[in-house]
Image: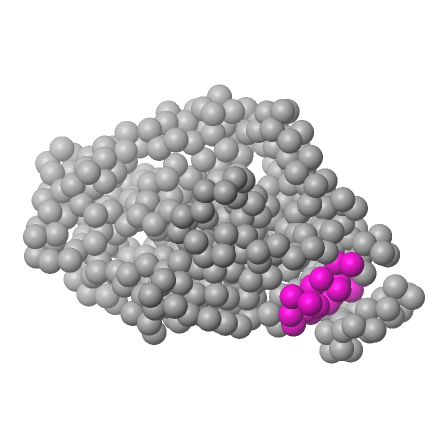
Amino acid sequence: MSTALIELESFLQKDQIKTDEESLKYWGKDWTTYFDIKATAIVFPRSTEDVVAIVKWARKNKMALVPSGGRTGLSGSAVASQGEVVVSFDQMNKIKDFSAVDQSVVIEPGVVTEALQEFAHSKNLFYPVDFAATGSSQMGGNIATNAGGIKVVRYGLTREWIIGLKVVTGAGEVLELNNGLVKNATGYDLRHLFIGSEGTLGFIVEATIRLAPAPPPMKVLVMAVSGLDAVMKIFAEFKTKTSLVAFEMFSDKALNKVLENTGLPAPLETKASFYVLAEVETRNEQDEEHALGVFEKCLEESWVLDGVISQSDVQAATFWRYREDISESLAKYSPYKNDIAVTISKVPPFMEDLDKVLAQAYPTWEVVWFGHIGDGNLHINILRPSGMSKEEFVNECRKVDIMVFETVKKYKGSISAEHGVGMTKRSFLNYTRSEAEIEIMRSIKKAFDPDMIMNPGKVI
């Protein structure tokens, strides 16, 4: 162990430091699989004071730090590939305070998303940001990536629910940002710089979360649709005439992978190229009648070819599996993923243009689409052909990234809707951000992180 690492033991307990090879590999990565892991050590702070001491140690020893939460990211933001020290927040996982009056809760960054949801439920409240990795993702990581998920149509992104942050900057300073205030018109709101910053400005050590009232009963509909244009017409009907919570789209290829992997029965007898899943609030019989009326209108217009409405919570949960089990069902193919977004109205022409690009680039490869159509977010999964090495596959896919991102730029979209930039899309940031914006981002990083030790090589 180097002198610098030995110095860690002057302010951390021995069980807060790991340097064995197994630990380095486990905590030094996220869900991306295309990077070599080369972490130097893993440290486990238990308090804000520990985090401050770690940052000051890193500044003194010119050691780069990488934050680590649930490691469920898909952009390489939590990957240690250049000898960095990984700062894991696994042991900072307390729910510290709750205010029934403010309907808010103060948490540490290592709190698992599902644990926060369960705590809110125990108070007859609701934390609405939801996605497939809620059982393992941590709130610090969700905030650092401004996580989205399946209920953005109704509840928005993580950003909407963060009313206060305590952070440790790259200079080792502790900042308390907004303090849970509803109104605070005192200049720049630095809280929002840290939300989505991917740990490049500093580390989140505490967050004050706004909670929502408990949701009403829901109905979930699964529908086979006649085409991409029909998807947006269906969305418009549900958006304007019901209390729409979620609106998801997936292709027949995605559904078939789920059925094959899970053994679930097909949701409908009718086959289609695309399916949509809609979740609506049904506070009373009138709400249910409105939802049924919209569904029948979509059938009459031939936008929907066939569909089914959940009749129980169990059935609704099963319907959601057709969408939420897609990623797990594709995992064995080591898919190359792209997570992109355009404004909602541009989704059909954007998908048609992009489909032509992908068909030309991958004429014999299987490409699986799904996405949060209600907020313009699409997920492209290119499945690795049998017999092709991972390295060859990634190299081929990256050649086509430029064509994909050129199409995104044409529609003034985003090259990363919710997975972040990390290392995977750092070199493509200019397709979404102007050079002037990127230069300002560099200046902001320098202000918070003067020694450039906070998650270097990520985002910019």
The extreme top residue here reads: 410
Instruction: Find residue 271 and report its image quarter.
Output: top left
Q: Quadrant of the C terminus?
A: top right
Which residue does the image show at 67% across and 29% down from the upper left?
439
- Residue 283 seen: yes
Which residue does the image show at 42% across and 39% down from the upper left?
377
Judging depth in this view, the residue of 450 and 400 nearest the camera is 450
Judged left or right of residue 110, residue 427 is right
Which residue does the image show at 92% across and 66% down from the upper left?
3
Above-or-below relation of 5 to 250: below
Residue 122: image location, x then y, percent:
34, 74
Above-or-below relation of 410 to 172: above
- Residue 143 seen: no
Judging depth in this view, the residue of 380 and 290 nearest the camera is 290
Write down the region rendered in magenta. Answer: 36-56
Judging depth in this view, the residue of 61 and 266 nearest the camera is 61
Q: Is residue 271 magenta?
A: no
Residue 411: image location, x then y, percent:
45, 24
Residue 289: image location, x then y, percent:
8, 50
Q: Is residue 38 magenta?
A: yes
Which residue does the image show at 70% across and 41% down from the upper left?
447
Residue 265: image location, x then y, percent:
29, 60
The extreme front residue here reads: 186
